[in-house]
Amino acid sequence: MLKCALDLAASRALDRGELPASAAARVSLAIALGEPAGSPSWLAGAWPGLAPLWRAAVAWREGAAVACSRDALRADWNAAARGWAAAWWAETAPISTSGEPFARALEAAARGSLARRLRHAMRPVPGWPAAQALAQKLASPGGDGSLRAQGGSPLLHATAGTPELRLHGVAVVLVLAAAQAAGEPALPAGALHALRRLGLPRLRSFDDVARVALCAWGRPLPSDAGAGA
């Protein structure tokens, strides 16, 4: 989380065409530059809200011990998610004009041409057997049978993006949901709709979706693997 906070400062500096050598200098520049342009009202204050996390991250990078309570850790996680969402929102401005966050995530995932999406959907993907095993486990009794039922062809998902971009889209949906939550992150209706489009039709728990995304990283999503089983 501390590294992510420093990466956000670096990304803001790179927007300016600069990359100071030290973490402290990158954070100072990111603070001076202010919040990325175009953030929606629900992300108001996200960039200034990173200040305590940035202080802790610089101290950590400089070798100081960092300790905090569970409540402080939760607040820092929310601040990191909100800061990331603000940076992502500015980055995706050329791709999407949608003011609804999860619709914007879908448009970002589908940014490639349809021909490219179809080509990627049909090519073999490394790690396919591992993803198939995950799909079968999730579709077993007690799992999410909808993943097996979805089956069919990877072409079903091609309109939503390449396999890699749809997986990235799942991660984006999770972080956007976390950025909107004051406490434990949950998946609102817009997030669930986006996840269905991206290839996870009936998973409703934030933790379950996060677990699937982490297991699938670098491999197909379970719904894609199930299609080839």
Image (cartoon, helix red, strand yellow):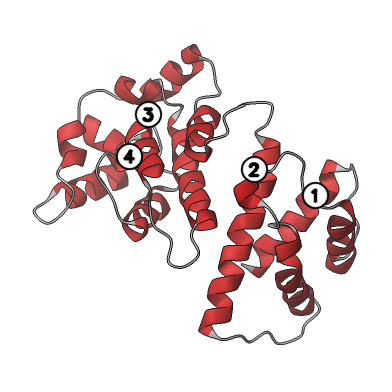
Against 197, is 182 above or below? below
Viewer-nearest of discs 1 and 3: 1
Circles 4 and 3 in contact, beta carbons < 8 Å: yes
Q: Quadrant of residue 93?
A: top right
Mark sitting earlier along the chain (3/2): 2
Q: Position of residue 65 (x, y in %)?
A: 70, 87
Inter-mark Cα distance, 2 to 1: 18 Å
Inter-mark Cα distance, 3 to 2: 39 Å
* Few, some or many residues within 10 Å of mark 4 (<14, 14–19, 20+): many
Q: Say which amino acid is labelled 3.
A: Pro
Residue position for label 3: 124
Residue at horizontal 20 percent and vertical 25 percent from the top: 152
Mark sitting earlier along the chain (2/1): 1
Mark sitting earlier along the chain (2/4): 2
Q: Quadrant of the N terminus?
A: bottom right
Circles 2 and 1 in contact, beta carbons < 8 Å: no
At mark 4, the secondary structure is helix
Residue position for label 4: 128
Q: Say which amino acid is labelled 2.
A: Pro
Residue position for label 1: 12
| Depth check, front residue: 91 or 71 | 71
Against 77, is 56 above or below? below
* Few, some or many residues within 10 Å of mark 1 (<14, 14–19, 20+): many
Mark sitting earlier along the chain (1/3): 1
At mark 1, the secondary structure is helix
Q: Position of residue 156 (x, y in %)?
A: 30, 22
Q: Say which amino acid is labelled 1.
A: Arg
